[in-house]
Amino acid sequence: MPLQNRVSPFGRIDTTPARGLFTGNRGVIHDPDRKALLRRRWTTKAWIVCVCAFRDRRRAVMGRNGPAGGTGWTELFFLDEVTALAAGHRPCFFCRRDAAKRFMACVREAEGGAEMKAVQADTILHAQRFAVSGKAHMLSSATVPDLPDGTVIAVGELAYALRDGTLREWRFEGYGAARSPDTLPPEVQLLTPPLSVSALRAGYAPVWHDSVAS
């Protein structure tokens, strides 16, 4: 039976049999005995996105994976890195060190903060995450074509990822049909946190699910 551990671009954690390319976490937010989420949705501002396979390590999803049988962190799963960035996560410095270094280099370049550390970026991201604030970042649809590839917007409950000038509908199973920015309503919601958008604009290239090419 699927567990409640699949993350949407809105940052919500849902239950679906669909699989994803990446895992990650927001700290310990599950009960290992019930293999179910607790009411809280994070215990840290460091929301990260990790690879699913690393150094032959094995984990019991939503089990006891911490030292001496402790709970350990709660495994969450994402369709791809574009989804994870939209939800407010950033690359892990442990299992994805090269990607994390590239991401922070792009953030520093875009923000002009040569000394910015990951902990500072996490604080900024936390204030910008839709799943945390519940506040939408609204944009004029006329500005959507100027956003960098990998940015995710929403029209109501539908999320779209920008790719090569078109919008691809996001689904847990993969990307759907393309939509032209010209068909958007006057305003749309920006899901990807502005800090991550600045990293994308500065050249950070996230990993896409293969379905985007279909």
Image (cartoon, rainbow, N blue to C red):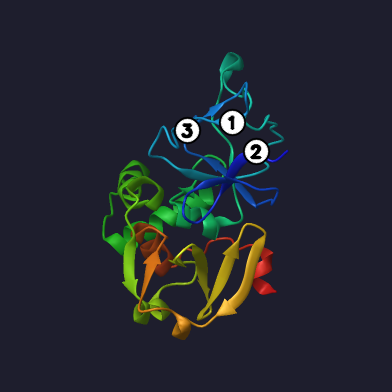
**How far is mark 1 from mark 3, CA to CA?**
14 Å
Three-letter amino acid code at the position of disc 2: Leu
- Point out the tag, 2 or 3, that comes first from the N-terminus: 2
The residue identified by callout 3 is: 27
* SS at badge 2: loop
Q: Residue at x 45, y 37 (%)?
A: 41
Query: What's the amino acid at mark 3?
Result: Gly
Q: Which residue is mark 1?
A: 36
**Whether label 2 touches label 3, CB < 8 Å:** no
Q: Nearer the viewer, mark 2 or mark 3?
A: 2
Q: Residues within 10 Å of mark 3 (few under 14, many from 20)?
A: some
Q: Are marks 1 and 3 in contact (CB under 8 Å)?
A: no
Q: On residue 3, which mark appears?
A: 2
User: Is mark 1 in CB contact (under 8 Å) with mark 2?
Assistant: yes
The kind of secondary structure element at disc 1 is strand
Image label count: 3
The answer to which quarter of the image holds residue 61 is top right
